[in-house]
Image: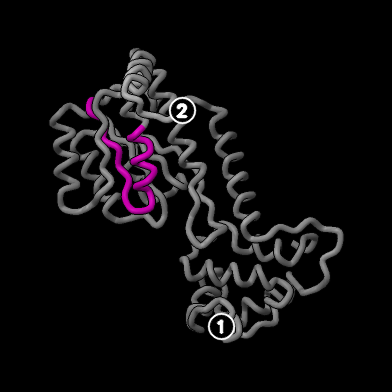
Amino acid sequence: MSGSSPAARLQELFEGRRLTPTQRRIAHSMVRRAGDAPFLSSVELAELAGVSQPSVTRFAVALGFDGYPALRKHLREVAPAGPETGEETYNEYQQAVLGEIENLRHLAELLADPGPVERAGRLLAASRPLPVLGLRAASSQARGFGYFAAKVHPDVRVLDEGGSMLHDRIDAARRAGATALICFALPRHPREVVDALAYARDRGLTVVSVADSAFAPVARHSDLLIPAAVGTGLAFDTACAPMLLGRVLLEAMCDALPDAQARLEEFDAGAVARGLFVE
């Protein structure tokens, strides 16, 4: 860490940590004041970030230190203040984008073996209907996948709301002939999603999961899990890699559906006839 700027050294310390939004707010404040960070008291840092002093203590513990004094001592040793010369520096927004670019690079490396994606595409194409599960942070991923999947698949059922009827909707899909379910699982992982996947497998469904890690809580209830990391550089996770992986799975599903192209052409013809789009 010694060869990079103070801001970059701090960013490296925070990368890969599962921090709450409040803790990320503290981290961002430290990055913005990288030169001063090793010398701020817990009270000063709390005021700077607009959080409570106990939140600063919990933040230090989340990073693996006994408390804030141990964190500050570490920062003074590895990230001392000083002028930054001859180095390209990035603000927190740029760093978030660069972090996502790195996540996409890792996804590209993973896809060098297309076998898992192709297997997933076949499983999803064969399931009639096809349940698509995603709750809370992952609900937008599920809805986006479901929107495009419905253009080529005859029966897509998006499950983006939890509650007591979630198991009922899984049962209904299974009775209608579903053989597989695709789940988008992103942090923080709702217990309801884990329970729903366990229930789906008990009912005989094959579970395909897109998750932020191969060790995500949904892993033990997934028959096929393909990981795509989320960005953690901002107060709330960014999910460019999981979204792109969802589109890749759609492509693989289209390849396994013999009438996919005909369905797309039919939709396009209907869209033109209805004047659906302005272009």
Instruction: Name the residue type under label 2.
Output: Glu
In the image, residue 156 lies in the stretch drawn in magenta = no
For the question of whether residue 123 can be seen, the reply is no
Tell me which label, 1 or 2, sits earlier in the chain. 1
Label 1 with label 2: CB-CB less than 8 Å = no
In the image, residue 137 lies in the stretch drawn in magenta = yes
Tag 2 secondary structure: loop
Q: Position of residue 44 (x, y in %)?
A: 60, 85
At x 63% / y 72%, what residue is drawn? 30
Q: Residue 47's mark?
A: 1
Instruction: Name the residue type under label 1.
Output: Glu
Label 2 crowding class (10 Å Cα cut-off): few <14, some 14-19, many 20+?
Answer: few
Q: Quadrant location of residue 142? A: top left
- Left or right, 33 with respect to 168, comes to right
Magenta region: which residues?
128-147
At x 48% / y 47%, what residue is drawn? 239
Location of mark 2 (residue): 279
Q: Residue 13's mark?
A: none
Q: Position of residue 169 (x, y in %)?
A: 17, 41
Q: Position of residue 242 (x, y in %)?
A: 47, 42
Q: Main secondary structure of the magenta part?
A: helix
